[in-house]
Image (tube, rainbow, N blue to C red):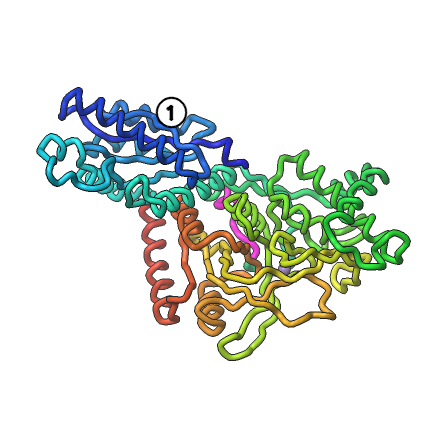
Amino acid sequence: MAFENFEVWFITGAQLLYGGDAVVAVDGHSNEMVNGMNAAGILPVKVVYKGTVNSAAEITAAFKAADNDEKCIGVITWMHTFSPAKMWIHGLQNFKKPLLHFHTQFNKEIPWDEIDMDFMNLNQSAHGDREFGHIVSRMRRPRKVVVGHWQDKDALKKIAVWMRVAAAWADAQDMRIIRFGDNMNNVAVTDGDKVEAEMRLGYHVDEFPIADLVAYQDKVTDEDVAELVAVYEQEYKLAEDCQEGGANRGQVLNAAREEIALRRFLQDKGAKAFTTNFDELAGMDQLPGLACQRLMAEGYGFGAEGDWKTAALVRTMWFMGQGLPKGCSFLEDYTLNFNGSKSSILQAHMLEVCPLIAEDKPLLSVHPLGIGGKNDPARLIFTSKTGEGVAATIVDMGNRFRMIVNVVDCIKPKKLPKLPVASALWIPQPNLEVGAAAWILAGGTHHTSFSYDLTVEYLADYAEIAGIEMVVIDENTTIDGFKKELRLNEVYYYINKALN
Ligand code: MN
């Protein structure tokens, strides 16, 4: 679990007004709370108590230390007593990492018979957390606010979501995305401002000629290939003509060679995501479909036709969802199925769908592909699991990035005997008519990053940390309301840009 490499720091706010005994009590309570939070078995990242801060100097020092610490991916703040919030200004001004404000309290209930003024002065989070919240809002500082007792599972689950997102955010800050070729000619939605993306989202995008990958491919030995094909035979069903001695066996070996070369290339370059382009295949035997599918399952973000924004988001959503059961994938809206209230969209791609979302053991098979002008490529064929998930994209609106998220319900498709690619079939919430119309009005891509395990809350936390626009299409969406939101956001981001 990659989350074991990270820490979230817990900083308690107080002041010295209430005397030395209070300081000792605050520290004792905070320690007990952090230990309890860690022991609950809900948080994926370890919480480290970093003491109580009682002055501007202590607050500034604590945030500086958090910013400089490699393992620290974010800070949780909580005001045990009252903490006058001007003390927090300088610390918050420089702090760059994700912030979560936990509005909680040591004691769960008021001790009705015992409570006196001393108790109330010591336990006044209701008071102190409002003062702290004010300055964070006044400073327009993005953060997540979670309200609940520290032993409450629902509160901890919200913190757990934020932790996974904060870890994915840390992962994105040095994300190198490698592109073989540019965007597919003339495509608008997959293009965008790579400089702004690096400033805003952390993504660094580099182009390499496919010839560099071909050079890696030339160094792959027959033994390497045989070893990988043995893995294929373990993990998948092989079509008869792909088995040893079969007519398409050579194509499977070539696909394995491409996969080995691509993995080594990405490892050598320190890349976390990549894109391919079917117009950039000189020296390759086939469009690398199987390789993209398998590398995605390992956590490499992937976008087809040069789509680096989707490649990055696929990596980020894979990272957030590590260890969760149902999986994620790059997908593309391909074909509509009009069927009343069950109208749906078939999700697929030429080849590249991640096998993490497969319902059953995938079939490894070789078929012709009209696009790209290369030999018949190998691919994994399967249909997806069913159930609710989220489809997300980030588009460049010219003056800002907009994240669009649609909650979708994956349903079982009919048999697809003549369609030799992996696919999913989903109904966008609230239904195809409203869901697809809203997506189109928002300027959403045909490529998406999809996950069964994540919810809107994860992506909302991500957009909050990144400071980008986010619009959600779910069961409550109406076209009237959605259009109003888009218009209001247009004004908000125009002014926001002018002020910053
Ligand atoms: Mn595509």
| Relative to 476, residue 377 above or below | above
Residue nearest the viewer, comparing 268 with 191? 268
Please state if 316 lies on the left or on the right of 418 as rendered. Answer: left
Q: Quadrant of residue 125?
A: top left
Residue nearest the viewer, comparing 306 with 387? 387
Please state if 362 lies on the left or on the right of 496 as rendered. Answer: right
Q: Is residue 35 visible?
A: yes
At which x and y percent is residue 457?
Answer: 41, 52
Question: Label 1 CB, ligand 1: below 8 Å?
Answer: no
Q: Residue at x 28, y 27 (%)?
A: 59
Q: Residue at x 83, y 48 (%)?
A: 253
Give the residue at the far bottom of this rendering: 340
Q: Secondary structure beneath disc 1?
A: helix
At which x and y percent is residue 476?
Answer: 37, 66
Asked whether residue 374 is drawn in magenta, I would say: no
Q: Residue at x 59, y 60 (%)?
A: 385
Q: Residue at x 56, y 67 (%)?
A: 411
Residue nearest the viewer, comparing 242 with 336? 242
Give the residue at the far right of this rendering: 245
Q: Which residue is the site of mark 1? A: 65
Give the residue at the far left of this rendering: 117
How many numbered tags mark residues here? 1
The residue type indicated by label 1 comes to: Ala
Asked whether residue 191 is drawn in magenta, I would say: yes
Q: Is residue 306 visible?
A: no
| Relative to 207, residue 35 above or below | above
Ligand 1, seen in the image, is in the quarter at bottom right
Please state if 50 lies on the left or on the right of 281 as rendered. Answer: left
Please state if 361 lies on the left or on the right of 129 as rendered. Answer: right
At which x and y percent is residue 422?
Answer: 67, 61
Please report the bounds of the magenta region as a residue range: 190-198
At which x and y percent is residue 257?
Answer: 79, 44
